[in-house]
Structures are given as C-alpha cells and as structure tokens.
Amino acid sequence: MPHKLRMFKIMFLWVTLFYLLLLSSCSTEPQYIFFKTGVRDQLQERAIKHCFGDFKVLQEEEFGPYTRASLECKE
C-alpha cells in the first residue's frame, strides 16, 4: 500500500507541473521577437523556436537595422 501512495504522489506532481507548463505557454498577449530587417528566414526561425511551432505575424515595426514582429503563437 505505501508503494501505491508514493506512486500516486509522484504522478500527481508530474500532472500538476505539466498543467502549469501548459498554462504558462498559452499567453493571449502578443509576443515579440527581433530580427534583422529584410532577413525573413531569421524571422521564421526565431518565431518557430519561440512559439514551438505554428505562429502568425500580427504586426511589424522597424527599429533601425532590426524589425520587431508581434506574434500570435498557435496551439
């Protein structure tokens, strides 16, 4: 019986941590990344890395030689 209780506690901890991870990654606010102006490959590479996959560019603003892109990460 003590073994089952210990396993239950460990599973509960893992499920709770996973749930918190999901909540923290699902932000509804726009997220920003910077990339060199005109280098679209860098934008795509950084956005995929930041969003862990699919994304949508909402807006772009130029700051000298760099551009700030506002992203919407999709699930």
Image (spheres, helix red, strand yellow):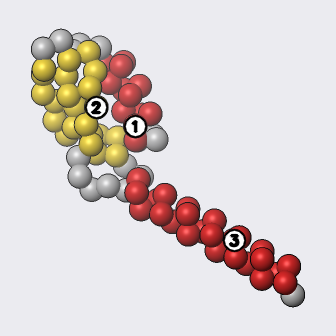
Where is mark 2, residue-wise? 33
At 32% from the left and 24% from the top, the residue drawn is 43
Left or right: where does residue 60 sit relative to residue 55?
Answer: left
Give the class, few, some or many, for how many residues have Cα within 10 Å of label 2's Cα (few <14, many ≥20).
some
Q: CA distance from mark 3 to mark 1?
A: 29 Å
Left or right: where does residue 60 sit relative to residue 15?
Answer: left
Which percent across, then down, holds residue 53?
A: 45, 40
Tell me the element at label 3. helix
Q: Using the image, tell me which numbered label, if any, was put on residue 11.
A: 3
- Which of the two residues, 11 or 44, is positioned nearer the viewer here? 11
Which quarter of the figure has residue 27? bottom left
- Which of the two residues, 64 or 54, is positioned nearer the viewer here? 64
Where is mark 1, residue-wise? 50
Which percent across, then down, holds residue 2?
A: 84, 84
Q: Amino acid at mark 3?
A: Met
Left or right: where does residue 32 sit relative to residue 13?
Answer: left
Sequence-first tag of 3 and 1: 3
Q: How many marks?
A: 3
Residue 52 can be seen in this image: yes
Q: CA distance from mark 1 to mark 2?
A: 8 Å
Q: Using the image, tell me which numbered label, if any, was put on residue 72.
A: none
Compared to residue 37, the image places residue 73 above or below, namely below
Q: Amino acid at mark 2?
A: Ile
Of discs 3 and 1, which sits in the foreground? 3
- Which of the two residues, 37 or 15, is positioned nearer the viewer here? 15
At 51% from the left and 66% from the top, the residue drawn is 19
Tell me the element at label 2. strand
Q: CA distance from mark 3 to mark 2?
A: 36 Å
Q: Amino acid at mark 1?
A: His
At 37% from the left and 49% from the top, the residue drawn is 74
Compared to residue 49, the image places residue 30 above or below, namely below
Sequence-first tag of 3 and 2: 3
